[in-house]
Structure formats: structure tokens, C-alpha cells
Image: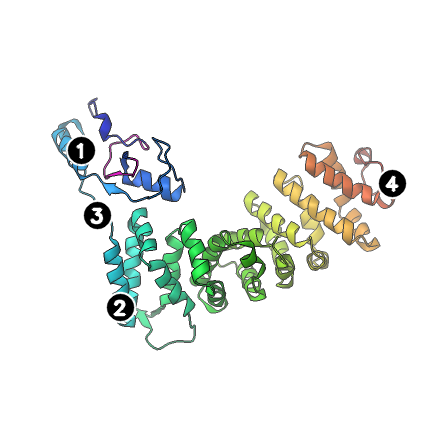
């Protein structure tokens, strides 16, 4: 392709490429639709990239005049290797969404057709997703989830031999909408039983619907206020643990672990997590996990749960509990080191029976903590390790279980 000068106003300020679907934001700057949608919606930015002004209204106005100029210029320069730009499909309107939602009430078949159409609309671009948010589609989808009845067979439609369940379709769309912060908060506020409904889906739904439900719960509860978080029910934690135990998908396990990290510190949630049987499941996951981020997240949940007596008891009752926590020290990352040493500190402070102290010696945990003091692994981690060793110096300091090259680093007791 020959070198050719492209008019600068054809170039998107974000992608620095020729715009194929130019749109203008309220600040008056024109961008390519895909680039500005990604900036505003996926990146969750609120300012215009060029002017730095806050964009209160994210409505994108198609710049048809500029698009036609670009198309004409591309046709004139086709001989230079410039590709023709097709006319983009216009985004959906609120009126079209409203009409679609009204049609859904006519029959189960119309409802399924509506859900399939909504899924198609949402997949086209981020503007359509935001239009669906502002047109009542989220509330419509949430109502389908709230009315979930796993025993219902009347009115079910089939795709070949597989039943088409409206709840599965609705959850799929809600998840893929990548709801804004405002929409997630609104969903929690207006649909007070949505957490209960999603728990019910997790109890009796398909693997796919359970995965969508936990991912949606994660997004919602990250935006919830403290009062909503401390009121979470025991049944929810039981189902979250079951998702981890069943390992229905890597994505579902990741979302569940992140959800437990965000909710465990609130109220009695750490106790609820322990009572739901999370600790042995987390230990089993840690035993077979080699991924850095997964290990860090599992250890973070265990660290939080071990701040309560129930969690510490569950860890000690598992034959591999102390061993696997210690094994991850100095093998994963600084974050994993810190979390693992804090777990050991919780055990040392509140569960220091003679049997536990001897087990820590025999498993090489005391020697590992001495090694932590000799290597570079973060000041806070070293301080926690030193605190553990000082707590039980009389029992451990002169033990033959500690190699001589590590015994010199054993801190003097206070």
C-alpha cells in the first residue's frame, strides 16, 4: 500500500485509526464507537479522553456527516489499498426494547423469543447494553430469575431434546450485560429477594445457571452496602461452598473465591463460611492448585475464616491443613507468604495445645518460619513470623527439629 496522508479528523483520538462508526460525546469530541464504548463502559471511565471533562450523560450521537465523508474518501483512495467502510448497523432504541418486553408477556414462546432477541442485541455493542439497562430490561430479567421454579414443566419449550429454561436464558443475559455500578445497586435495592432467588438457582439449577448466578452475585455484592452484607443467609454460603466442591467451571470457582474474599470480613460471615464447610474444600483446592492468583485467593479466604474459632478448628481437623499452608510459604508470592504466615499466627495465638505445637515442629513449620526471617519476603511477613516464633520459644527454640543453620535466626523470646 502506498503512503497516503489521512485527514486528521478521520482519526479516532483513542485508537489512532480511521473511524468506521464515528460518534460524538456530549463534550463535542468525536471518537470511533468501539473505542469510546470500551473507554466509558468496559474501562468504567467517566471523563472525556481529550478534554478531561466529566461525561454525565453517556449518550453517543452518530456523526453521519463525518462517516459519509470517510466512506467517500475511502472509495476515492481504493486504488491505494484503502478498504471500503460499510455503513454500521444503528444501535437499538428504547422504544424497540420496550416493545420487545411487552411482547414477552403474551406467551412462553414469546418470552423465549424475547430473551433470544435480547441476547443478540446485547452482543452487538456496549451502547445496546446501556440502552437495555435504561429501558427496563434488567428488571424484566430479574423478575424471571425471581420466579424460578425448578419443578415447573408446563410451558417448557425444547431445543431438540434439551429444555429451554427462561431462567438460564435470563441469567446468561444479565451476566453478559456487564451491568454498570448504578444498575447493580438498583438491582439490589429494587429486588430485595434477588440474592435469595439466585441462591435458589444455585441449589437446583443447571451447572450453567449456577455459574452465571455466582458470577452475578459477585458483581452485585461487591456493590452492596454493609447492612446488606451482614444479613446474608447461611444457605447462600452452603451453595457457594458446593460450587467450589463441584468445580463446575474454573470461572465459577474464581468468582466464588473472590465473592468469599469480599463478604467474609462482614458481621458473622466468616463463621457462616466455616459452618458451611468451606475450610476442608479450600484446603483440597489449595492442595491441587499451582496457579499464583488462585493460591493467593484461597489463602486470603482461609486467613479471614481462621480469625474465628470455627475456622481454626476446621483447619486443624483436616490432616493436611497446617502442612499445605506452610508448604505455600516462599513458593507462590509475597501475598501468599503474608496470608499463610497470618494463618499460622492465628493458630499459634488461639490453638496452641501441646499437640498442635509438636505438629508444627514435626511438619517443619517452625523451621520454615526461621527461613522466612533469613530471606527477602516483606517486612510485615517477617514481623508476623517473628511473633509466632517468640510466642512459643520455650518449646521450639532448642528443638532438634530445627536445622542448625536456621536455629541461629530464631528470635530471642521477650
Question: Marks 3 and 2: in contact by CB < 8 Å?
Answer: no
Can you give x and y, in whole percent of width and height, for residue 86 in the image? Answer: 18, 41
> Mark 2 or mark 4: which is in front?
2
Q: CA distance from mark 3 to mark 1?
A: 17 Å
Q: Nearer the viewer, residue 369 or 14?
A: 14
Residue topped by disc 4: 398
| Circle 1 crowding by C-alpha within 10 Å: few under 14, some 14–19, many from 20 | many
Residue at image location 79% in from the left, 35% down from the top: 406
Question: Marks 3 and 4: in contact by CB < 8 Å?
Answer: no
Residue topped by disc 3: 90
Which callout, 2 or 4, points at the residue further toward the start of the chain? 2
Residue at image location 46% in from the left, 59% down from the top: 188
| Circle 3 crowding by C-alpha within 10 Å: few under 14, some 14–19, many from 20 | few
Q: CA distance from mark 2 to mark 4?
A: 77 Å
Q: CA distance from mark 2 to mark 1?
A: 41 Å
Q: CA distance from mark 2 to mark 3?
A: 24 Å
Please tell me whether mark 3 sits on a helix, a strand or a loop: loop
- Per the rendered image, the range of residues in magenta is 14-27
Amino acid at each position: 500500500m502506498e503512503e497516503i496522508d489521512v485527514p486528521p479528523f478521520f482519526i479516532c483520538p483513542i485508537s489512532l485509526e480511521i473511524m468506521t462508526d464515528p460518534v460524538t460525546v456530549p463534550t463535542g469530541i468525536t471518537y470511533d464507537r468501539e473505542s469510546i464504548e470500551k473507554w466509558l463502559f468496559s474501562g468504567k471511565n467517566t471523563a472525556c479522553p481529550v478534554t478531561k471533562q466529566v461525561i454525565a450523560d453517556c449518550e453517543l450521537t452518530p456523526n453521519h456527516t463525518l462517516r459519509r465523508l470517510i466512506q467517500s474518501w475511502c472509495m476515492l483512495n481504493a486504488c491505494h489499498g484503502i478498504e471500503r467502510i460499510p455503513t454500521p448497523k444503528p444501535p437499538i432504541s428504547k422504544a424497540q426494547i420496550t416493545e420487545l418486553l411487552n411482547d414477552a408477556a403474551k406467551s412462553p414462546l414469546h418470552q423465549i423469543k424475547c430473551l433470544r432477541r435480547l441476547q443478540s442485541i446485547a452482543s452487538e455493542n456496549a451502547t445496546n447494553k446501556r440502552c437495555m439497562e435504561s429501558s427496563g430490561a434488567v428488571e424484566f430479567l430479574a423478575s424471571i430469575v425471581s420466579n424460578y421454579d425448578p419443578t415447573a414443566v408446563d410451558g417448557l419449550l425444547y431445543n431438540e431434546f434439551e429444555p429451554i429454561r427462561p431462567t438460564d436464558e435470563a441469567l446468561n443475559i444479565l451476566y453478559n450485560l456487564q451491568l454498570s455500578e448504578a444498575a447493580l445497586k438498583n438491582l439490589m435495592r429494587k429486588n430485595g429477594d434477588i440474592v435469595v432467588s439466585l441462591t435458589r438457582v444455585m441449589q437446583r439449577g443447571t451447572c450453567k445457571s449456577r455459574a452465571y448466578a455466582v458470577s452475578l452475585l459477585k458483581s452485585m455484592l461487591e456493590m452492596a452496602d454493609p447492612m446488606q452484607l451482614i444479613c446474608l443467609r447461611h444457605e447462600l454460603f452452603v451453595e457457594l461452598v458446593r460450587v467450589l466442591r463441584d468445580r463446575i467451571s474454573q470461572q465459577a470457582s474464581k468468582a466464588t473465591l473472590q465473592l468469599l474474599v469480599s463478604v467474609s470480613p462482614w458481621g458473622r460471615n466468616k463463621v457462616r463460611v466455616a459452618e458451611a464447610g468451606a475450610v476442608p474444600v479450600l484446603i483440597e483446592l489449595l492442595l491441587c492448585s499451582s496457579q499464583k492468583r488462585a493460591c493467593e485467593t484461597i489463602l486470603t479466604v482461609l486467613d479471614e475464616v481462621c480469625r474465628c474459632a470455627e475456622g481454626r478448628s476446621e483447619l486443624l481437623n483436616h490432616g493436611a491443613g497446617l502442612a499445605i499452608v506452610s508448604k505455600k510459604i516462599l513458593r507462590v508470592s509475597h501475598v501468599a507468604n503474608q496470608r499463610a504466615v497470618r494463618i499460622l499466627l492465628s493458630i499459634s495465638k488461639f490453638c496452641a495445645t501441646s499437640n498442635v505445637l509438636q505438629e508444627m515442629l514435626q511438619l517443619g513449620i517452625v523451621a520454615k518460619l526461621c527461613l522466612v526471617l533469613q530471606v527477602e519476603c516483606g517486612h510485615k511477613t517477617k514481623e508476623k513470623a517473628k511473633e509466632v516464633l517468640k510466642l512459643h520459644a520455650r518449646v521450639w527454640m532448642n528443638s532438634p527439629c530445627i536445622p542448625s543453620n536456621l536455629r541461629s535466626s530464631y528470635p530471642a523470646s521477650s
